Image (cartoon, rainbow, N blue to C red):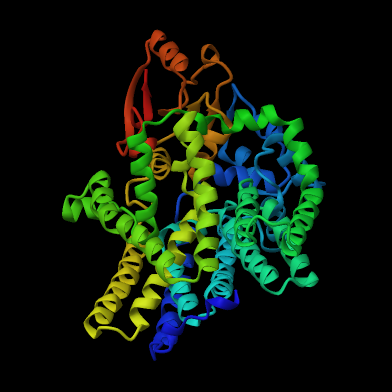
Amino acid sequence: MSQTKLTNYQLPLKNLRLLVIIILVIGIFLRVVNLDKKPFDGDEFITLTRAGGHQRETVLSIPRDKIITPEEMKKFWQIAPETNVFDTIKITANEAPQHVPLYFVLVRIWMQWFGTSLIAMRSFTVLTSFLVFFAIYWLCMELFKSPVVASISVALIAVSPIHIAHAQIARPRMLWILMFLLSSAAFLRAVEFNRKKDWLIYGVISVLNVYSFFFSNLVLIGHGVYLLIKEKFSLTHKIKKYLSTVIFVLVIYSPWILVLLTNSETAKIRTDWTNEPAAFTDLFCSWTKIICDIFIYWHDFFEKKFLLSEEAFVAVFGGIFVPLAIYAFYFLYKHAPKDTWLFIMCFTGVTALAIAIPDLTLGGRRSAIDRYILPCVLGVQIAIAYLLATKITKPSIPVHTKLWRIAFTVIISIGILSCAISSSTETWNGKENFVSQSSNIINEASRPLLISDAEVFAVAPLNYELASHVKVLLVSHPTKVVIPNEFSNVFLVYPSQELVSYLKQQQFKIEPAYQDLYLNTFVWKASFPTTLWKIER
């Protein structure tokens, strides 16, 4: 984008480079600190089993209706013998076709090198998040030709709570962010120079992108919409090059398209939960919370110290950051070259509209899931980076420049503070974690037995925290439960209503041993607390 050389960046801050390096170091530290302390969750167990070559039916074949030890389930922490990356691809295709396989293949290779511990699994995502710094810098240089905007973008992402939270979980989100940024930067370079090698690079990265996350196809569409508008809807040489590249990507992606068509029913079952209806007010509040999460994450600390519940917190900070984001896009539109603002608004708008409109018209909650709209998050951050870079370096009214520098300092500071608070506690929101609290109670009990008739995937995170002396009884049917007399403390977790009713019919007394009273908010608000039950004879 040759027109994006901005004249108002002739007065860069002398210490900006040093400041960004310091912020970057802090961001790196926040990504690695207590990496193994955050609770292991069910999604990560899916990553572990899928990357490790364990078929779902094998995992579900854990013995039921007999006493087992936690180690029976922990065997899935090892890569399945006599399997390879093709087994990982096959398992992903058959069991979760909506999840493209690149991430799971890379994690498998990573685990073969560094082991299958929780910290080893998560470290791959952390490393990917480090590469995001280089990718966002490259994209902003292609967009603005300004090291100042690029540096501020890096600083904003380095201490952004939403980025750090996703960087500490073994899931594909960070890989998608990386590939989205790289493909967008490569696209801009290809459009600017229109060289065969640049279009080839864009095509190769786009292939990696579509194999990184299902919604990457929206990125390709966003690029196409931008180029079509830029070329004034004419079939120019650049449009032809773009279409040729898209065909190249689709040809290589076609095997997975066939997988999706063949296993569409499986994909539908796996994603049905995203179709659950949600009120518009809950969706709107969830969108507002996502924007808040870019800068500051709600933590129990705010409720205890300032009496700010999560709902009140979102109302207060949403009232600050939503107008800031809107103004940033307006400022981008008014002051940046057309090619620049058009590109940012195309990839942001295409993703937002493609995911939000079905929610609003057909019902669903996809747009309330932050990982589905990460390009929108990046669009907000880039727009705000441009706003801050312009305001803090533009030779205008000194007092205005000083105020915007204070605003930049405040945004960075609250990001660091928010991440520091969240990193120091077991969970990101500071609330007690059900798995950790329940496992502590069970582990400290004398001769404990844990009973459940739930799926292995639901019980696995709790099982991971159990000590070796704990015994587990997975029940195949509620009426088949037989509780041996040898156990002094019997616990029940994730029971079906049928199992609870049957136990009560058998004259067992069931009382809560621990309840997770945090019911979440907005779209995700639960109707009742998750409970660890104690069974008394």
Q: Residue farthest to the bottom?
A: 14
Above-or-below relation of 364 to 323: above
**Of residues 506 and 515, the one drawn nearer to the viewer in this rendering:** 515
**Of residues 486 and 203, the one drawn nearer to the viewer in this rendering:** 203
Residue 365 position, x and y percent, is 46, 36
Using the rendered image of the protein, determine whether residue 87 is visible from the camera's viewpoint: no
Q: Residue farthest to the top?
A: 505
477 to the left or right of 289: right
**Of residues 394 and 17, the one drawn nearer to the viewer in this rendering:** 394
Residue 255 position, x and y percent, is 80, 43
Residue at 65% over, 39% down:
98
Total numbered badges shown on the rendered structure: 0
Residue 57 occupies quadrant: top right
Residue 174 position, x and y percent, is 56, 58
Residue at 46% over, 71% down:
336
Residue 147 position, x and y percent, is 50, 81
The quadrant of the picture occupied by the N terminus is bottom right
The quadrant of the picture occupied by the C terminus is top left
